[in-house]
Image (cartoon, rainbow, N blue to C red):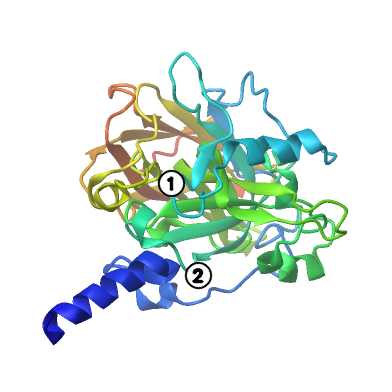
Amino acid sequence: MNARAILPALCLCYCFTVSGCAPYPGRVAASLKGPQLRNGVVGPATETAGGSREMIVWNAPDLNNGQTWAFSPNYSQDDIDRSLNLCPPAGVLFGEWKDVEKNQSQHVAPMRLIHGWSAASQFAGSDFWGTHRYRDWNVLLVGSGGFEQFAAPANDPNFADWSEVQDLYVQNPEIGRIIEVEWDSGFFAPEMAPQLGDETVVVGRWDFDCGHESATKSGEVKTTGFRSEMHAPAILISAHITKNEPSSLQTRYKIFAGSRSGPLDTVPLLFFFQRLWGTHINQLGGQDYSIALQAPQDGWRIASCTSEEGTPPGGRSKKIETQLQPSDGGKSLTLTLLAKPFNSGARVGRSMIVNAVWVPENSPGRQGAVKCE
């Protein structure tokens, strides 16, 4: 074998054994490829003088209705065993992700919704090339009240050995469990990811990461099981305060939706081909989605708003149309993702940014008459 043949063969063998071969998409800015700043104190990036409230309120559909697989607030062996029973011994290479729950009648996992705050947002350190077309973009999300139920025992570094997030607990010892949100960057634009401290809503596939097992800190048991996460999301919405003044508040909302998620369901012997051509499809089509975008505190109304196209997902997909209009007398904006015309398995997506200016309710001007353009 000559030198020209030996080098590619060595590179191929290297990529089979080393997890760091999944590449970055060529379109990604160099500034996003390195480590990003992490949030010292988890919570809103900017507090207003009048306090803060949720800027993203999910209206419909009720995706968590009838959810029966919630993890208990206390650590039980049943919660730990659940992931151990689902994840195969060779999960680090094959079958890396297993659905926490399945809709038995449809043989698909129902989409779930999580609301919280972004504590970190950046590329994964490395990903196995056989099950990733491109490197994942990861968001560490601290769930708000009621959404911690999606985080497994292994998600709490106070209980489990999760060394990568220990720095967050130095200044936030009370935050408890963290859930990771992962999306193959070939099908998600990192430019549309939340910034540190941004309020974030995620809709997508709730699963166990069978490559991330943790042990207890106390040593009482050998394992806390595998971490749960959202991989991959179908919808990711974040809110950020861009200007905070007594007479004016400006907010930016990023909205990203995409049914294609990358080669998540690879199987032994076929993963090489699935990496190149396969892709998991979130069941995004078939229904509309309604979200209220609000000012960061009560007593404000919309003064003006504009929308623009965001960075699109990779690959070809049909565009989901949207509606954006003031509601509740101008106290919020109602955003509707019109995905009902598509079948549930359609390859669809949408990326957009909404910029809004809010003023006190008693400010001059016609209330509720603003048109978003």
**In the rendering, which numbered label is found on residue 110?**
none
Which quadrant holds the C terminus?
Answer: top left
Residue at the spot of label 1: 255
Mark 1 vs mark 2: give the one in front. 2
Identify the amino acid type marked 1: Ile
Q: Nearer the viewer, residue 113 or 239?
A: 113
Residue 243 locus on image (x, y percent): 57, 63
Q: Position of residue 176 (x, y in %)?
A: 79, 52
Q: Is residue 345 left or right of residue 102?
A: left
Looking at the image, is 216 positioned above or below residue 287?
below
Which residue carries the number 2 mark?
125
Q: Is residue 207 left or right of residue 131?
A: right
Please report the residue visible at 36 percent of the width from the left and 48 percent of the height from the top.
Answer: 352
Measured from the top left, where is residue 282 in percent x and y? 39, 34
Q: Is residue 326 above or below residue 29?
A: above
Instruction: Answer few, some or many: residues within 10 Å of disc 2's Cα (few below 14, many 20 plus, some between 14 and 19).
Output: some
State the residue at coordinates (83%, 60%). Answer: 217
Q: Is residue 29 left or right of residue 159?
A: left
The residue closer to the viewer here, 198 or 345, is: 345
Distance (Cα) linking label 1 and label 2: 25 Å
Q: Residue at x 75, y 46 (%)?
A: 153
**Residue 91 is at least partly visible in this image:** yes
Mark 2 residue type: Gly
Name the element at disc 1.
Answer: strand
Label 2 residue SS: loop
Q: Is residue 72 visible?
A: no
Decide which of tag 1 and tag 2 comes sooner along the chain. 2
**Quarter of the image containing the N terminus?**
bottom left
Callout 1 environment at 10 Å: few (<14), some (14 to 19), or many (20+)?
many
